């Protein structure tokens, strides 16, 4: 990943990072799939103006998560990791 969201100050939302190898959010409720909604927001902000880079980077994470977490459903992987990036960029998937 080329950009990593970081809190802007003490009152900022903590960075929602993946807990590996389960690929659940390290901040949200247990078993919340990552990227969770706050992680998606943080990623979109970190890649502002670079929607293709965001899609490429989360696409690379998709392949790692598939192997580590044993997720085999391609539709689930696409929806979880890639589809939202086009929506946040204003492009229909």
Image (spheres, grey):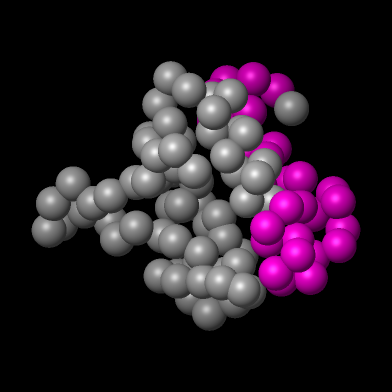
Image position, residue 91 (x, y; %): 64, 20
Q: Is residue 23 above or below residue 42?
A: below
- By secondary structure, the bulk of the magenta-drawn segment is best described as helix
* Left or right relative to 52: residue 43: left
Image position, residue 85 (x, y; %): 60, 34
Task: Point out the image quarter for the C terminus.
Answer: top right
At a point 60% along the width and 43% down the height, the residue shown is 58
Asked if one can make out residue 32 in the rendered structure from this viewpoint, the answer is no
* Left or right relative to 66: residue 33: left
* Residue placed furthest toward the left: 10
Magenta span contains residue 69: yes
Magenta span contains residue 66: yes
Q: How many marks?
A: 0
Q: Is residue 41 above or below residue 12?
A: above
Asked if one can make out residue 21 in the rendered structure from this viewpoint, the answer is yes
Q: Is residue 46 above or below residue 48?
A: below
* Residue placed furthest toward the bottom: 30
At a point 53% along the width and 79% down the height, the residue shown is 30
Image position, residue 36 (x, y; %): 53, 57
At a point 61% along the width and 33% down the height, the residue shown is 55
Image position, residue 11 (x, y; %): 15, 57
At a point 62% along the width and 34% down the height, the residue shown is 56
Q: Where does the magenta region start and end?
A: 63-92
């Amino acid at each position: 990943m080329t950009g990593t969201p970081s809190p802007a100050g003490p009152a900022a939302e903590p960075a929602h990072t993946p807990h590996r190898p389960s690929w659940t959010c390290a901040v949200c409720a247990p078993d919340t799939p990552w990227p969770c909604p706050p992680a998606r927001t943080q990623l979109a902000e970190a890649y502002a103006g670079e929607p293709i880079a965001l899609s490429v980077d989360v696409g690379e994470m998709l392949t790692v998560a598939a192997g580590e977490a044993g997720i085999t459903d391609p539709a689930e992987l696409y929806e979880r990791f890639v589809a939202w990036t086009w929506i946040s960029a204003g492009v229909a998937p």
